[in-house]
Image: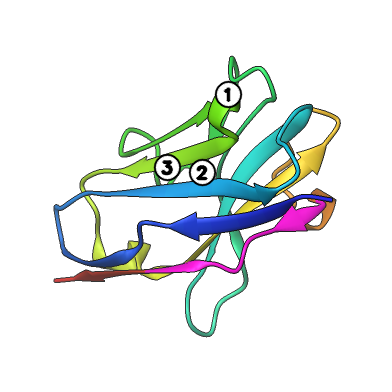
Amino acid sequence: QVQLVESGGGLVQAGGSLRLSCAASEGTFKGYAMGWFRQAPGKEREFVAALTWSGENMYYADSVVGRFTISRDNAKNTVYLQMNSLKPEDTAVYYCAAKSGGFVSYSDFRYDYWGQGTQVTVSS
């Protein structure tokens, strides 16, 4: 069992930056791929970024390539999402998720554990 807790969301102006963190309050990330998803009002949850257990392979949605960076510190059981050059369309609740097996998926239903989400609001 893994319990995930996100932090770092908030209100930022367009062009600004935020760094989201996802920590395991219980359990460990060992062997899990980690992903970030987001859900804007009235829209379905969508893939943002993910990385393998080793951290060597990272994957991004086209909409965030070059602006967002996912990373992990397995010793701290923490995953990060550095978000730069934020746009109003990045406004959403951001969720981190853990997937057993070590390999990523773009599909949210393949992830086993989810955090409660953190709100990111980008003003124009």
Q: Nearer the N terminus, badge 1 or badge 2?
A: 2
Task: State which region is magenta.
Answer: 112-119
Q: Is residue 101 left or right of residue 69?
A: right
Q: Are marks 1 and 3 in contact (CB under 8 Å)?
A: no
Q: Amino acid at mark 3?
A: Leu
The answer to whether residue 30 is above or below residue 124 is above
Question: Does residue 21 appear in the picture of this structure?
Answer: yes
Report x, y in % for residue 25: 63, 52
Does residue 115 belong to the magenta stretch?
yes
Q: Report the mark closest to the observer, 1 or 2.
A: 1
Residue identified by numbered label 1: 75
Crowding near pointer 3: few (<14 within 10 Å), some, many (20+)? many
Which one is nearer the viewer's eye here, 3 or 115?
A: 3
Q: Are marks 1 and 2 in contact (CB under 8 Å)?
A: no
Q: Nearer the N terminus, badge 1 or badge 3?
A: 1
Report x, y in % for residue 99: 78, 42
The numbered mark at residue 95 is none
Q: Amino acid at mark 1?
A: Ala
Q: Report the mark closest to the observer, 2 or 3.
A: 3
Q: Quadrant of the C terminus?
A: bottom left
The answer to whether residue 94 is above or below residue 20 is below
The numbered mark at residue 81 is 3
Residue identified by numbered label 2: 61
Helix, strand or loop at mark 2: loop
The residue at 60%/69% (across/down) is 116
Does residue 84 belong to the magenta stretch?
no
The answer to whether residue 91 is above or below residue 1 is below
